[in-house]
Amino acid sequence: MSKELRASEMKNSNGGEINHGYIQTENDDRKHTEQTKVSQIEIPVTQDKEDEEHLTGCAKVANKIQTTVGVIFSKYGNKIKLVIKLVLLLLYFTYLGYAMYYRFGDEGSIRFLVCSIIGVIFLLIHIFQRLCQSSIGTFCQRIGSTCKGLKKTRRYIHRFLLFAVFVFLTAYIIVDVLLDYPENAVSIAGLAIYIILFYVFSKNPAKINWRPVFWGFAIQYIFALIILRTQWGYVTFQWLSDSITESFNYPNAGAISVFGELYTNYFFAFKVFPAVIVFFTVTSILYYLGVMQVIVMKMGMFLTFCLGTTPAESLNAAGNIIGGMTEAPLMILDDPFLEDMTNSDLHVVLTGGFATIAGIVLGACIQFAVPANHLISASVMSTPAALAISKLAYPETERPKTKSNNYDKMGKSTDRNVIEAISSGAGNLVKVVATIAVNVMAFLCVQEFVNMTLTWFGDRVGVEHLSFQLICSYVFYPIAFFMGTEVPNCRRVAELIGIKTFTNEFVAYTELSHLIENKKNFTDYTAHWNLSSDWYYQGEDIILLYVNRTLKNGIISAKSEVIATYALCGFSNFGSMGIFLGGMSALVPSRRGDLSKLVLRAMIAGNVACFLTGCIAGLMYKDYGST
């Protein structure tokens, strides 16, 4: 009976016949594996015994100590690590308590306390997830199996939340924004125009899933509401930007010691690049420690929860906030996410890369005196906008292959310790710095050549000062206007958009920094000489009489400055198309054809995502700096 039972268990699925050869082979393999394991265990033991026989005196004592310590750590290693962590945590809280007792009330103590509270919250969340993850998953599975109407209930809850958020945002915009600043309503028209255009020219309008579209814009609104319409939100991000800017000033001491006090004459080399070095080094260390992966994973889970996007889409979008357009896909390369992505998923990855800027570029742009608080918020706000506009432009028509819970399969650092992480990061940084420098020089040279050529052609027909910037100021005028830019500044902001689209964001932010510096000089001047006869316009330039200074290209208002900061915050330009396409093709060579078809559409969508962020900034703008 037992033989028949064993035979019936070994029947194959095709013909139901017993594969005796397979049984014999499996048994032989199993015996071979067990013998190999035994031999692997016995050989080191035998070698250790032979080595011990030759040890004498201190060497023998040292060997016994090493063996004893090794046994203790192998047996109680986890408990020892836990005790060390608890001791370190206790010492930290002891230091925190004494620091608060010794000095409390200044900015440093508040920063220390807030960061500690945030750290404790994340630690508690991590511990709770580790302890309760399995039980919560089992509980949810039981509910899902017993409650047949759970999906229907979730659908009703989602519709209720959608309706509630829509009503809240609409009421808030009418009551708190449009009644006080009716001119901001033009930004609503800009949002509507972009949504309608992308719906009409969508790849498949009938397949659009409106959930990611709505929640992408809703998250943008909520984030802008916190930053631009609340005093505490504005102050918080201003404090954050000041802290980041302060950290970027640390390399100045090294530059002064090597190149002297006049190092600032080479601003790009010794102010911009050190900021890139600081950010890249810190990011490399955090990536090695796994902190960066945790941050990206939590942000990705949040985006999936709100927008209903796949883990691959959400993780890549979150990674774009910190990494660059070619670095973020590396975070999802360990699992075959990229290989199995649908065309809609690939379009999301491309659009997310074009709609944001890397953290290292963010650090460089801060050195241009561009408002750091708006740069930080723009990079975050453009992430849900990229997901929303991408799903509108290229909706999902296939069945995604990635699972809904694949959040832990992210790229890990290959470095073996912190020193190697810093060293390898520095090696990679050489390429980044060289790429930035060469690209800026190349695009500025090409731009100057184009301007000289256009000026020559203009002179032939009596058109003076014809230039690339002049053409852009008219072509992109409607975009600047419908973002809410004040009319006198529309041509100037349109010019910046054209520079960013056809060259890159570095050149555009450089031009914006000149306008910001002009405004600062103009404000300082008018504080002493405020009569209309003390200064005047000469074309687009402002002449300051008493200091004999010309503010080239004039100035723009604070609102236009903020809108331009948001609109320029992205890699969406023609030069980046080649960089992104080359990087992605190297990661997934089999999808090169699909990527080449999607890259232009994604670049346009990335630009529009930045413009949508500019529209929301124009709608929600409130000048707290003057209050």
Image: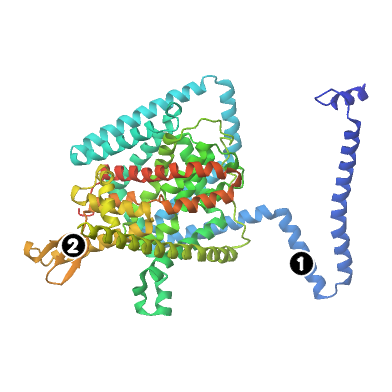
**Residue at image coords 40%, 44%:** 604
- Quarter of the N terminus within the rendering: top right
Label 2: state its secondary structure: strand
Which numbered circle lies on residue 541? 2
Label 1: state its secondary structure: helix
Residue nearest the observer in this picture, 551 or 13: 551
Where 290 falls versus 146 (above or below)? Answer: below
Can residue 624 be seen?
no
Mark nearer the N terminus (1 vs 2) = 1
Q: Quadrant of residue 182?
A: top left
Mark 2 and mark 1 in contact (Cβ < 8 Å)? Answer: no
**Residue 93: x and y, percent?**
48, 57
Q: Residues within 10 Å of mark 2 (few under 14, many from 20)?
A: some
Taking 464 as reference, is 50 left or right? right
Where 132 falls versus 459 (above or below)? Answer: above
Can residue 380 be seen?
yes
Taking 184 as reference, is 143 left or right? right
Where 54 falls versus 205 (above or below)? Answer: below
The mark lying in front, picked from 1 and 2, is 2
* Mark 1–mark 2 distance (CA, rounded to whole Å): 79 Å
**Residue 262: x and y, percent?**
34, 78
Tell me the kind of residue under disc 2: Asp
Tell me the kind of residue under disc 1: Ile
**Residue at image coords 32%, 52%:** 498
Q: Residues within 10 Å of mark 1 (few under 14, many from 20)?
A: few
Residue nearest the observer in this picture, 230 or 402: 402
**Residue 522: x and y, percent?**
18, 63
**Residue at image coords 52%, 60%:** 91
Residue nearest the observer in this picture, 308 or 108: 308
Reading the image, the residue beneath label 1 is 65
Taking 392 as reference, is 41 left or right? right
